[in-house]
Image (spheres, rainbow, N blue to C red):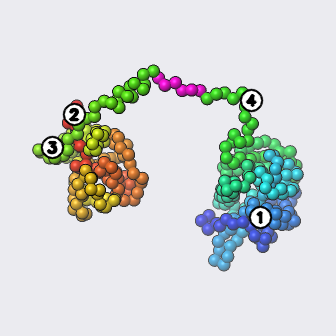
Amino acid sequence: MADASKIIYDWLASEDIAAALIIEQQGYPIDEAANLEAFEYRQSNAGDLFLGAYLAQPKGRELVGYVCSTLSPSESLTHESMSTHVPSSTSVCVHSVCVSPTQRRRKIGLNLLREYIRRLEAAQKGGLPYKRILLITHENLRQFYEQAGFEWVGKSSVVHGALPWYEMRKVFGSPETEIAPSSNPEPNPVQQVPAGIWDALQRASSAPRPTALPFSAFPGGTLDLVEPHSSKLGASVNKYDLLCPRIKCGSIILKRGVGQWVERASVQMEPGSLPSDSILAALPAPPETCQWWLITPSPMEFENIGFSRPVQHLQQNSTGVAEDETLGLRRMRFGAAGVERGGQQ
């Protein structure tokens, strides 16, 4: 059986028509299978709609499945729309989705169909006039096509073989492009702002900011800033709220009791050099140690802070927080933030 990782998708070449026809005849009853003439017509006139799934082999590749279609201006499948190809039309009419019997039940067909849809959507975004993909199927395959994003339309007027056919479709872009606008559209409701909300926001924005004290303002240093952890024996946490040290900011970074004081190995921050006006002191070079506020289990423990994008190494943001995505924790430099004495209230 084919390894899904070794499947290659490519537009079917003329020399592979015979192999595709064998798969068609193995996959469909005699009264439903297409003939060589139909395959040659589809490949020569709509080769950019005839996609093959190939299994990579040491000496080449083997065709194990395909999807083939033609174009029609019709918005529904009929005998006429399936028997002709009208270039530059809006409907992609799928004739067959088939996988070799020896390669089934490995999701090759579903992955092939999804790749087919992806290519058609890319072509549509690139300027081709495709608006929809149409197909007819038997009822037992409804779930298969729904997994690929098709919607059930209903029983088809097409009669081909002994069993009834049902139409399904996938519309590109917004479904509204396929639906006529209502003659009496309802206006969008206007959301009313609660009375007094603007005054409340203005009062909050003009409220005096708390005054932060730098680490150097505490005579006892670290001992003045920590207190015992409420449940973890031997651990210490921040005794006060920690504030942003930037002038005129003062927003709370950590509430009291959130950061655990630890001494860990230093790290190399990015960027490596601090700007001349930085409020942060340079870190010692690794492997020397320094003091951190250890924030666990997630960055949601912070009160008011923005994070830089996830990386696989430490990166410093504007408040001196080191982010370590690989460890799943956040460590903040001990002296990076100001302290609000009132935070213990």
Give the x, y percent position of residue 203: 35, 27
The residue sitting at the top extreme is: 195
Return the residue nearer the eye: 252 or 327: 252
Q: Left or right? Give the position of 174 relative to 280.
A: right
Mark earlier in primary sequence (4, 1): 1
Tag 1–tag 3 contact (CB < 8 Å):
no
For the point 42% across and 53% down, the residue is 309
**What secondary structure is the magenta-colored segment mainly?**
loop
Residue 129 sits above or below residue 243 on the image: below
Q: Give the range drawn in magenta.
A: 189-194
Q: Depth check: 314 or 193 in front?
A: 193
**Residue contact between numbered discs 4 and 3, judged by CB atoms under 8 Å:** no
Residue type beneath disc 3: Ala
Quadrant placement of the N terminus: bottom right
Q: Is disc 1 surrounded by few (<14), some (14 to 19) or many (20+) residues within 10 Å? A: some
- Image point 27% across, 56% down: which residue? 276
Q: Which of marks 3 and 2 is nearer the N terminus?
A: 3
Is residue 202 toward the left or the right of residue 220 in the image? right
Asked whether residue 257 is drawn in magenta, I would say: no
Return the mark for residue 47: 1
- Numbered disc in front, either 3 or 2: 3
Inter-mark Cα distance, 2 to 4: 62 Å
Q: Distance between the residues labelled 2 and 1?
A: 74 Å
